[in-house]
Image (cartoon, helix red, strand yellow):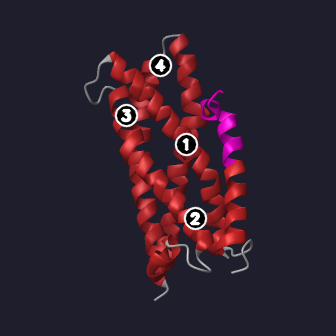
Amino acid sequence: MDLVPAIARWVHFLAGVMWVGLLYYFNFVQIPALKAAAADGTAAGITKHVAPRALLYFRWSSIVTWLAGAAILGGNFVGAFTLQKGLAGIGIGAWLGTIMLINVWALIWPNQQKILGLKPATDEEKNKARRVALLTSRANMMLSIPMLFFMAGGWSHRALFGL
Amino acid sequence: MKNPLDSLWGTVVCGVILTAVLYLAVKNFLM
């Protein structure tokens, strides 16, 4: 049945655009904006009203993206993750996306909860959380570059690997 | 040495380099 992979691919793209779009928003816009806003005392507007909403869509779109990606792989799921012949390109993309998903839920979100005051934390813990969240967000941005390369060329287009 | 991930464009450059490395690895060892 072709309907399930077709819908899964559509959902994968929709959620993936939201996830990676918000990741780029954090790195290209919000982090530099917070630095400037802290200097003139207007950071609260971002941390109170913008960041929690952005993080809500960011973390849940990561789950939807991954699940829809797994649905697209279907019977090739194990072959892709074990980098079998013909599936290594998309497998690398799938691994990069999976590492990014783990980073979102295990490092970025728990630390952002401390930074935004959604979870109690001392000033020292908040400073440490800021550093971990920044570096993890940057690591995800770095990983997104090869991830998108392998997603685009690994399976759906087959242009680069001649599959 | 400064962490390249502290800089936005350092992060982008690292991503591009990682792409090239992984591409060559897949092309040469996993195809």
Tell me the distance, in whole angstroms, between the alpha carbons under discs 1 and 2.
Answer: 16 Å
Q: How many marks?
A: 4
Which amino acid, mark 3?
A: Asn
Task: Pinpoint the chain carrying mark 1.
Answer: A
* Residue that carries the numbered disc 1 in the rendered image: A139
Tell me the distance, in whole angstroms, between the alpha carbons under discs 2 and 4.
Answer: 38 Å
Quarter of the image for the N terminus of chain A: give it: bottom left
| Label 4 Cα crowd, 10 Å radius (few <14 / some 14-19 / many 20+) | some
Which amino acid, mark 2?
A: Ile
Residue A149 marker: none
Q: Secondary structure at mark 1?
A: helix
Residue B10 lies in the magenta-colored region: yes
* Residue that carries the numbered disc 2 in the rendered image: A92
- At x 45%, y 34%, the residue is A133
| Label 1 Cα crowd, 10 Å radius (few <14 / some 14-19 / many 20+) | many
- At x 48%, y 68%, the residue is A69
* Residue that carries the numbered disc 3 in the rendered image: A111
Q: Secondary structure at mark 4?
A: helix
Which amino acid, mark 1?
A: Ala
Which amino acid, mark 4?
A: Ala
* Residue that carries the numbered disc 4 in the rendered image: A43
Residue A86 lies in the magenta-colored region: no
Residue A97, x across and y down, in percent: 51, 58
Residue B10, x across and y down, in percent: 68, 36
Q: Earlier in the sequence, mark 2 or mark 3?
A: 2
Within the image, what quadrant is residue A71 found in? Answer: bottom left
Q: Magenta region: which residues?
A: B1-15
Q: Earlier in the sequence, mark 1 or mark 2?
A: 2
Residue A139, x across and y down, in percent: 55, 42
- At x 38%, y 33%, the residue is A112
